[in-house]
Amino acid sequence: MSRWLPALLPLLLLPLLLLPPAVPRRAPGCAALGLCCPGRDPSCLSTGRRPDGSTGPCYCDQACTRTLDCCHDYGQACPVIPCVVSQWSAWSGCAEPCKTTYRVRTRHIVQEPRNGAEPCPALEERAGCVEYWSRQETECQQSLIPALITTGGFGKGRKRRAAADGSERTGYCVEFQLVALGPGCLQGQRSHGRWTRDLREGHTVCVECQQPALLPPRQHCRGDGSGSHLNQLLHWQAVGNHRCKGTWRRIRQLDTCSCPSVHSFLFI
């Protein structure tokens, strides 16, 4: 038998040669272990093929995309899930009555961002506002109300409309000394807001109160400073340039007036 063994050896080895080559066992990666971790988590560890083609320890945490040590199936096992937010709520009322303050609207997160998605956008927005009535439904003191003003040229059209419908009534003027201006006053770009660039601290300005800004029963304009103390700082806001606002002091009221063409404004 032993003398036939060399001749039979190729026949015995032939089945082994015909077997397909062994397939290397694939590493588990992220999906097989159910790994998908936020941030940088050293314990979120598996083994397998890495982005550079090497094999060995690899990670399934969010930070692996920056450190380039993710497992081969991280993108499939941990897809980017973007943040989803709700629609904006309705605007709230002003935070406080009788002063320039703000109102708020909010939204909430419906789905948190995951796996490297962009952070959620702001969940709160604020906008300036003024309420002219207190919580007790009484009109605010005039000294607390910021005056809304525009260029005096706008009043010519007002007067023509009032005369046409027979509603013209005698108004009045108030002189103020400008104390402080916001930097936005020098940046009026639109045609209806460029007049704010002529405002200067220390100048005396004339502001006219006329229809339809005259309010019953006292026939006054909001923000005219009536009832304010001597040298009290009052607030004003330019219409047409929301960034232009400031303070002034009331000098006097002129019951019959015609404001000059220079430094002439109008209550809204």
Image (cartoon, rainbow, N blue to C red):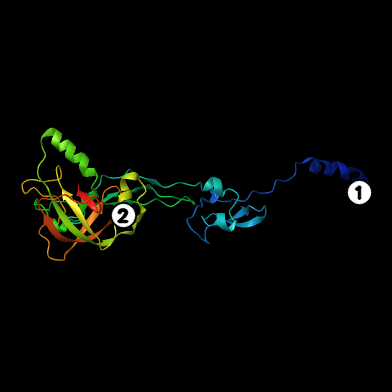
Amino acid at circle 2:
Asp
| Label 2 or label 1, whichever comes before in sequence order | 1
Question: Is residue 47 at all visible to an observer of this figure?
Answer: yes
- What mark, if any, has residue 2 been given in the picture? 1
In depth, the one of 33 and 249 nearer the eye is 249
In this rendering, does residue 243 appear at all? no
Residues packed near mark 1 inside 10 Å, few (<14), some (14 to 19) or many (20 plus): few
Extreme residue toward the bottom, this view: 231
24 or 15: which is nearer to us? 24
Q: Choose mark 2 or mark 1, whichever is in front.
A: 2
> x, y (%) of residue 179?
24, 63
Residue at numbered disc 2: 198
**Residue under the image location 23 percent in, 51 percent down:** 264
Instruction: Pinpoint residue 58: horizontal percent, then vertical percent.
Output: 59, 56
232 sits to left or right of 1: left
Image point 67% across, 55% down: which residue? Answer: 54
Q: Position of residue 172 (x, y in %)?
A: 12, 50
Q: Residue at x 28, y 45 (%)?
A: 89
Extreme residue toward the right, this view: 3
Helix or strand or loop: what does disc 2 sit on?
helix
Q: How many marks?
A: 2
Mark 2 → mark 1, Cα distance in angstroms: 118 Å
Outermost residue toward the top in this view: 165
